[in-house]
Image (tube, rainbow, N blue to C red):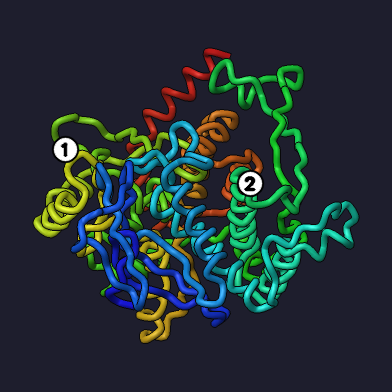
């Protein structure tokens, strides 16, 4: 299979599915060009066993490296259907990214998003093989709950709930799988492969403040509220199902000064890129995925500006853009890293593959590709393994660094006696929270803790430069009310 030609591409690598049901996920080099045509020349006809195959050419080539494709020997038609769905998502022919969202050059979702979708479909296809079920099994009128429970998506939902109960996956991960499966069924309906979808839609009303100004979000009264109708489906994991790990992680667990010192002093964290990942999390509140997709053009030469802090735009969860603040010391470190010989070499490799027209990510791997967010998330696991040799128990996740930022900044602003409304607004904006209740948890937690002397020094070092800027903003907003 290693040299098999697939739409002018080759199989690059594969991964077995967890269920060992013969479903593989390949990453191939594929041509998604425009206006295909068959080669008529005799030498362009390939022999495959007793069948002659003509090569396909394109008037304009578009080579995509490491494009995800599914294959299952016992479910070839299903594999092809799912692969066509992946192609349509990449081309933007179905559910193109919303305005402002990350896109590829063809207008569809990025490869990173496509990998996630392919992984969800791989699990679903493996389950279909295991239980010997056809995904098109849709009853004429599955109106009753009992009838609906026997439909493939809902049976698969029960399998996912069992995995949640066994602490194999989180509820959020399971809902992501179901979301991608729902999109596949919607695509099948749109392309007339099925006559109806096996799930029901419903509308939920979300109260939303009028946003005539930023602070209306917090200070406008109930009369200014209006309901925003959001369409959703009933193909979700109910909130009552949650793994033990999720229940544990629901509690806020920021780092203390000792734990930060342990982590940053390990041999593993000596690499400049890894230290910067940690700093971007605990000094700016960035998620691992946001760090992985950070563009290099956000880094500027700090000596030319004279600023104490730098406002930077990042694209966060759900393709939502927000502004973060980068302290001067961190911007200096980022500038040095960006212009380091090793980083410049990797940037050159990126340009060879993608050209100079595509914005380079700040963090690249040795092959010149954008790093995977899992590489960032796994940092704390490697730190824990190293510290274990010193008989130190380190039970921290990378996301706890983000919690450290939120808690420390909330405590910092509370101690500077800034207005509560400003603290709520500012923290929610910097963290990119979708729900105000999430932000309030950090503020409530910050009120209950007392920083040790070492932590106080660290907080002042990280956030000291923000004080005058925040205080000016707080006074301005108070005066405007």
Vertical position of residue 328 compared to residue 128: above or below: above
- Residue with the mark numbered 1: 301
Residue at the disc numbered 2 = 192
Is the residue 24 above or below the residue 85 in the image?
below
How dense is the environment of label 2, judged by Cα within 10 Å: few (below 14), some, or many (20 and up)? Answer: few
Mark 2 and mark 1 in contact (Cβ < 8 Å)? no
Across and down, in percent, residue 438 comes to 62, 45
Q: Nearer the viewer, mark 1 or mark 2?
A: 2
Q: Nearer the viewer, residue 219 or 461?
A: 219
Picture coordinates of residue 373 (x, y %)? Answer: 39, 59
The residue at 52%/65% (across/down) is 79
- Please, what secondary structure does the residue beneath circle 1 have? loop
At mark 2, the secondary structure is: loop
Identified at 25% across, 49% down, the residue is 362
In this picture, residue 97 sits left or right of residue 309: right
Nearest the camera: 213 or 392? 213
Q: Nearer the viewer, residue 73 or 466?
A: 73
Q: Nearer the viewer, residue 137 or 258?
A: 137
Give the quarter of the image for residue 349: bottom left
**In the displayed structure, does residue 259 sit left or right of residue 62?**
right
Residue at 46% of width from left, 78% of height from top? 16
Would residue 265 be visible to someone looking at this image? no
Position of residue 118 relative to residue 245, above or below, is: above
Label 1 Cα neighbours within 10 Å, binned few <14 / some 14-19 / many ≥20: few
N-term-proximal mark, 1 vs 2: 2
Residue 127 locus on image (x, y percent): 64, 73
Q: Tell me residue 236's x, y (percent).
A: 71, 55
Q: Is residue 289 left or right of residue 328?
A: right
**Most distant residue in the left direction:** 341
| Quadrant where the image shows the N terminus | bottom left
């Amino acid at each position: 299979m290693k040299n098999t030609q697939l739409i002018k591409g080759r199989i690059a690598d594969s991964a077995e599915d967890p269920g060992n049901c013969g479903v593989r996920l390949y990453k191939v080099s594929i041509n998604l060009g425009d206006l295909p045509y068959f080669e008529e020349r005799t030498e362009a006809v390939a022999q495959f066993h007793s069948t002659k195959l003509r090569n396909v050419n394109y008037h304009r080539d578009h080579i995509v490296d490491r494009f995800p494709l599914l294959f299952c020997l016992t479910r070839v038609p299903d594999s092809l259907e799912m692969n066509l769905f992946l192609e349509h998502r990449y081309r933007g022919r179905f559910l193109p990214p919303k305005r402002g969202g990350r896109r590829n050059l063809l207008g569809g979702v990025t490869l990173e998003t496509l990998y996630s979708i392919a992984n969800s479909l791989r699990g679903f296809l493996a389950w279909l093989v295991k239980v010997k079920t056809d995904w098109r099994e849709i009853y004429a009128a599955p109106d009753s709950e009992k009838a609906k429970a026997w439909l493939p998506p809902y049976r698969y939902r029960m399998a996912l709930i069992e995995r949640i109960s066994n602490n194999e996956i989180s509820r959020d991960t399971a809902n992501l799988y179901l979301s991608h499966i729902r999109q596949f069924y919607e695509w099948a309906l749109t392309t007339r492969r099925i006559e109806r979808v096996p799930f029901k839609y419903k509308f939920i009303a979300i109260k939303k403040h009028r946003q005539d100004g930023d602070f209306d979000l917090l200070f406008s009264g109930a009369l200014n509220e209006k309901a925003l109708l959001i369409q959703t489906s009933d193909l979700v994991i109910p909130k009552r199902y949650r793994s033990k790990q999720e229940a544990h992680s629901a509690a806020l667990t920021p780092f203390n000064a000792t734990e930060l010192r342990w982590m940053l002093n390990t041999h593993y964290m000596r690499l400049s890129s890894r230290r910067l990942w940690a700093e971007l999390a605990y000094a700016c509140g960035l998620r691992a995925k946001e760090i992985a997709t950070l563009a290099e053009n956000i880094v500027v030469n700090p000596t030319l500006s004279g600023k104490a802090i730098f406002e930077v735009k990042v694209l966060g969860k759900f393709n939502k853009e927000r502004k973060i603040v980068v302290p001067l010391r961190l911007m200096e470190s980022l500038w040095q890293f960006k212009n380091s010989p090793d980083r410049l070499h990797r940037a050159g490799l990126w340009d060879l593959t993608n050209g100079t027209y595509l914005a380079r990510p700040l963090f690249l791997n040795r092959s010149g590709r954008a790093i995977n967010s899992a590489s960032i998330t796994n940092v704390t696991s490697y730190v824990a393994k190293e510290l274990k040799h010193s008989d130190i128990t380190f039970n921290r996740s990378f996301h706890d660094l983000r919690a450290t930022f939120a808690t420390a900044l909330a405590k910092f602003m509370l101690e500077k006696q800034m207005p509560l409304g400003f603290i709520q607004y500012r923290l929610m904006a910097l963290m990119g929270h979708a729900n105000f209740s999430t932000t309030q948890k950090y503020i409530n937690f910050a009120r209950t803790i007392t920083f040790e002397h070492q932590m106080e020094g660290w907080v002042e070092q990280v956030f000291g430069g923000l004080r005058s800027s925040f205080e000016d903003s707080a006074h301005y907003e108070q005066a405007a009310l």
